[in-house]
Amino acid sequence: MRKGKNFFAYLLIVMLCIPSFVYGQNTREMNYAYDYWGRVIEDIPFFELYTTIDQGSMGDVKVSSMDDVTVSGDRIYIVDSVESRVNVFNPDLELITSIKVVRNAEGKIAVDEKTKKQIVLNAPEGVFVHEPEEEIYIADTGNQRIVVLNEKDFSLKKIINQPTNMVGQTVFKPSKIAVDRINRIYVVVQSGFEGIIELNQDGEFVRYFGVNKPKVNLLDYFWRQQASEEQKAKMQKVLAPSFNNIEIDDEGFIYATTQDSSAQDAVFRFNPKGENVLRENGFWKVRGDLNTDPTSTSVARISKFTDIALTDYGTYAVLDKEKGRIFIYNFDGELMNIFGGKGYMKGEFADPSSIAWLGEKLVITDKQMKAAYVYAPTEFGKLALSASEAYFNGEWDKATELLLNAVAINGNYEMAYSTIGKSYLMKEDYETAMYYFKLGDNQEYYSKAFNGYRSIWIKDHFGWIFATFVLVIGGVIFSEWRYYKKQKM
């Protein structure tokens, strides 16, 4: 009988320990980074939860979803596709207005000149604020159009329907929008495989922009080469993966993301020609999580990016819908930090949908939880981000000082050592650069610093090297002379 009691007591202890063990695993997995070899190392998050925007912030306005977020000046714009609304907040996270029924400058309900119907949003999926023209662009997805409002009073400025000169098979169903400084409009549509649609300021079709190349399946390629024309016609066509989000930086470069696992790349930075010029000078490509277990057949660790947020100093954050994580990269494509996770606990996301910078903070929306989470940088995060900004602006001494303070908090922050090493490399202090590159396990830049160090060392010791060389050559000549002299004797 006692044995039975002991067994149940042990079982109870084990059951009580399981939640804490699982939580410990969760927490450890959330705060990590990758080293040069792709191994997971413990890390400190850049951000921590600051506050939340949810139904309690909305007053009488019902919230059913949060699908897209953008920040402009002192306003936050959040799209609710279920309620067909764009909700606007001030910096104190107080609701300014909720847009569903669009009004004209006189305050009356606006009417579409073509259809003669009132303009009411229908399942919008994206919003973008074009600051130079003080315009709000709303992807009115359900109505297959773009609604443009005045940023000051939210009155109607114009409607952009499907262009009459649009070519291709893409259905004009806008999902995300970006507008550059010369008023070119870039539109991501649902399941559009022909690329991003570029329109001029009048809403006329210009071209499909950007190429999202699919991965090459060598086996399929081989069979296509062997197949007849009739067989090729019956084979399934390989379509380009679609983009799912878009953003634009201060220089006019278009950033885009895709969560299609068949795509070669996950994040893009397109120049005016539509070429991907994203810098990827880190240890790994900008793909988010690595599948570090070569024996694993699961794709659960492969990130699926759903949105990207840009700073004005090249650093950007990408949101992983698959794992609920945020990956911070600098302008060179070096992975700076990973934080967040999938779940229902504090600091986790059930169904993350969008991300945007709010000054030095981050706003992340969650469709399932019907909330937007505002994250503020930790002390470590502030130091690292400020260092990234200083380095981007060429303030290398300032960046070095900030990073030295950062590694005092987190000695595992390997990227900091590499950045410090680069600063010393630019100053031609090769020996110190080598020291920090070794700490950061950066073999490529260590070789560059070593080459510089070797050149200077040879230059400084050239006299001794030359004298040694002359002595060696002289010794060889003298030895040969003595040898031949002995032979003649």
Image: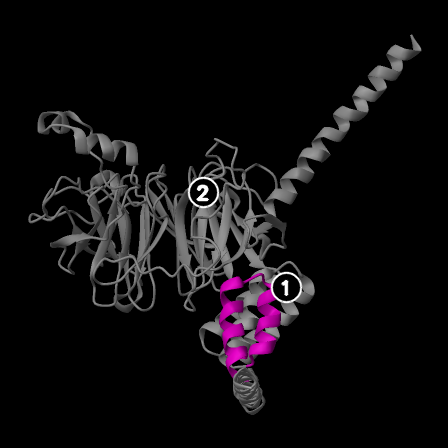
Q: Is residue 444 magenta?
A: yes
User: Which mark, residue 303?
Assistant: 2
Residue 111: x %, y % from top left: 16, 47
The amino acid marked with disc number 1 is: Glu
Residue 246 position within the rendered picture, expressed as x and y whole percent measured from the top left = 32, 52
Quadrant of the image occupied by residue 269 = bottom left
Classify the position of the C terminus by image quarter. Answer: bottom right
Q: Quadrant of the N terminus?
A: top right
Give the residue at mark 1: 379
In this picture, residue 398 sits left or right of residue 97: right
Q: Nearer the viewer, residue 258 or 173?
A: 258
Point out the stretch of residues depicted in magenta.
429-456
The picture places residue 217, in percent across and down from the top left corner, at: 30, 36
Per the image, label 1 sits on a secondary structure element best described as helix
Q: Does 438 lie within the magenta span?
A: yes
The Cα atoms of the two marked residues, 1 and 2, are separated by 27 Å
Foreground residue among 400 and 384: 400
